[in-house]
Amino acid sequence: MSTYLPEPLPLFWQLKPVSSAPAGVEVLNDGRRKYWIKHDVLKNVTPRMLAWWFGHMEGDVEIQGQQFPRYRVWHPLDHVYARYVRRMPDEPVRPGTQIALCEYLGRNPAYKIETVSTIEKLDQTGFIHAVIRGGVQMARMEHVFTKAADGVRDENSLIVPGTARLGLFARLLGPFLFPDGKGQAWLKHNIEEMGNLENFETGANSNGFVEARLLDGLITHENGYHKPALLPDTGSDLRTKRAKFLPPF
């Protein structure tokens, strides 16, 4: 595929450092590689909101009066596009839906990922999707969401190859698919993108994150407008600091 690396979007907020989350790589007994991260708590985010996000990565987001592709804002440096495929127009994203993704880890052309992944699970407990070639799982990503007192924890992993059926061949295929440098770049990229979700806030709309926040009791409804909670340390309105989502439906 010939998708080019676009110019980065402005950084509207500081990316979380790698040191914010325990992370690493291990070789499983069957030879596969597992890259894992235990993310820092995503404050003022809920499992319901994460489930909504992974089902709505298409569309635009408004920041400071300008619209940007939602997926690119999720990681302004590395992301190129995301679109759901093999899905009916009015059908919600669910297991069986496929998503086409393109990103350059660390903006390195050698670490380009452009693939189609099939969603296996998407609910308030987690998100799982896998890249399948010729009936074989080449890669598998798993997220586990756990509610915390001040937000949500996400533990996620990337397993390469995604299936244990390959036996000893997995020991050869893993380093070919994801060499060490690319794996470390993925860990950094993932810590940054998941941390960015703390900075997203919705506008006056009854869909998306607004609906999720209402259901979880995190914001109030006042005079027909969904008013975000105030930042506890400054009392300032979150809308001045966060992206405003414009769901595409």
Image (spheres, grey):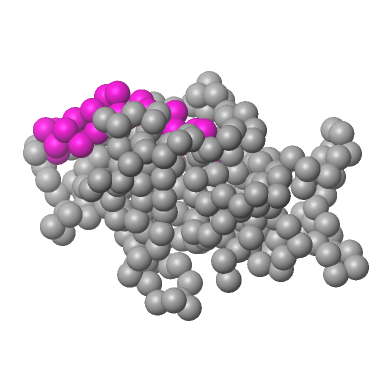
Looking at the rendered image, the quarter that the C terminus falls into is: bottom right
Asked if one can make out residue 13 in the rendered structure from this viewpoint, the answer is: yes
Q: Is residue 175 left or right of residue 124?
A: left
Q: Residue at x 36, y 51 (%)?
A: 101
Above or below, comparing residue 242 to residue 11 in the picture: below
Image position, residue 145 (x, y; %): 53, 49
Name which residue lies at 80% across and 62% down.
226
User: In terms of depth relative to the viewer, which is nearer, 220 or 125?
Assistant: 220
Q: Nearer the viewer, residue 45 or 165?
A: 45
Residue 86 versus residue 63: which sits nearer the camera? 63
* Side of 61 relative to 21 (left or right): right
Q: Is residue 178 magenta?
A: yes
On screen, residue 200 versus residue 136, left or right, reads: right
- Residue at screen point 90% across, 68% down: 223
Q: How many marks?
A: 0
**Res 12 quadrant in image:** top right
Q: Position of residue 162 (x, y in %)?
A: 25, 47
Image position, residue 237 (x, y; %): 83, 44
| 249 part of magenta stretch | no
Tell me the chief SS of the magenta region: helix
Q: Is residue 153 visible?
A: no
* Vertical order, 206 against 233 (above or below): below
Residue at the image position 62 percent from the left and 29 percent from the top: 14
Q: Quadrant of residue 60?
A: bottom right
| Quadrant in which residue 234 is drawn | top right
Residue 208 x, y percent position in the rendering: 63, 63
Residue segment shown in magenta: 170-194
